[in-house]
Amino acid sequence: MRKLENLGWEQFDQTNAELVARVITVQKNSYRISDGTLDYIGHLSGKFINEVENPLDFPAVGDWVEVQKLVDEQKAVIKRILPRKSKFVRQVAGLRTDAQIIAANIDTVFIVNSINQDLNVRRIERYILLAYESGAKPIIVLTKKDTCSLDELELALSEVENVAIGVPIITVSNITGEGIEEMWEHLLPKKTAALLGSSGVGKSTLVNTLLSKEVQLTNDIREEDSKGRHTTTHREMFMLPNGALLIDTPGMRELQLWDVDSSLDATFEDVEVLEKECRFNDCQHDTEPGCRVQEAIEQGELSLGRYRSYLKLKREIAFEKRKQDKKLHIEEKNKWKKVKKSRQEKYKLK
Ligand SMILES: Nc1nc2c(ncn2[C@@H]2O[C@H](COP(=O)(O)OP(=O)(O)OP(=O)(O)O)[C@@H](O)[C@H]2O)c(=O)[nH]1
Ligand SMILES: [Zn+2]
């Protein structure tokens, strides 16, 4: 069982550890899973497929699953997902409100952004919000330090500090190696971290930088399929030389919010405090004279951009909630329609 523990396993469930594995890559209809000794191609059991409807209840990278192993074939049947300690969920763009799970059982979320014209503090705010909601600890990583001047770096840092209250910020360069040591402080053996951020910010390069010390140690998670062939699918979960687990995620073009109501306060603690300090109970914090929020904006304590972003996110969350309620309502209605129909059919048969 030592090996399973190397993947971060802590006995939190009655499940026999012999039957437990961790999801390291998600492909279309199959999963690559590991028990710390061997890799397996995992498929969902028929029962699983029949019973599970919610996309959030399907395995994600980092999930612990109960399996039936076919050791000789290096295949496994996934029977169920063990309870998740944390999960990072985003909403899938489109007409339907559907959530997608990016990674599960993560201890630390690295929110990766590059220091250049793409740096977007509004986006960082969203990531922090989602990180708090996920149950993992957020850390901000600003990459490509080598491409900017000292002034640019300082400007970027001060902008990010304004929105990332209480969140550690690390600036790194994959080229000079600057800042990488600081990342190691947050990468602990048997703990799981995930890299999140837009495409092109340097997530995969960071994985390579962190792996490069002793790449052979990552062989634990093997690059061959069941027949020993080399596979080209890219890994999502890596074991770093010090035994930390790191999940790389595909770049997200947009980040819509999903059920993050309770985390808004944590992310915008400064704004919440000002709103509470406002002496008017029913203040819209808009144009009322003597409003504390307006005062803070005028005096430069709170930036107008941040306050607008807060209001916008609040509206967006409320909108998503209504959309969800509507969806639930329609689903409920359809369910009853079905029940009614089947009753009618029964009646007709008699
Ligand atoms: N100058 C500089 N370039 C970097 C740094 N880190 C990454 N890059 C470059 O940025 C580009 C994108 O890096 P990736 O690691 O592929 O970005 P990613 O975040 O994994 O992107 P997706 O896989 O699309 O989500 C590559 O050309 C890297 O060489 C850095 O610290 N400095
Ligand atoms: Zn006010």
Image (spheres, helix red, strand yellow):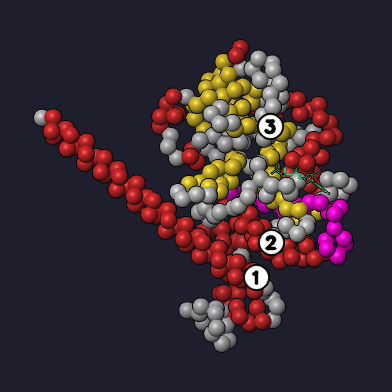
CB within 8 Å, label 2 to label 1: yes
Q: Secondary structure at mark 2?
A: helix
Residue designated by label 2? 121
Amino acid type of the residue tagged 2 in the rendering? Val
Residue 277 percent across, percent down from the top left: 58, 77
State yes or no: residue 84 in magenta: no
Identify the residue at horizontal 74%, vertical 40% (top origin): 204
Look at the numbered disc 2 and say if its residue's Cβ is closer than 8 Å to ligand 1.
no
Amino acid type of the residue tagged 1 in the rendering? Gly
Identify the residue at horizontal 61%, vertical 80% (top origin): 294
> Magenta segment range?
134-153
N-term mark: 2 or 1 = 2
In which quarter of the view is residue 117 placed?
bottom right
Amino acid type of the residue tagged 3 in the rendering? His
Residue designated by label 3? 234
CB within 8 Å, label 3 to label 1: no
Quadrant of the frame with the N terminus: top right
Residue designated by label 1? 305
Residue 106 percent across, percent down from the top left: 63, 42
Q: Residues within 10 Å of mark 1 (few under 14, many from 20)?
A: few
Residue 181 percent across, percent down from the top left: 84, 46
Residue 126 percent across, percent down from the top left: 61, 57
Alpha-carbon span between mark 2 and mark 1: 10 Å
Mark drawn on residue 253: none
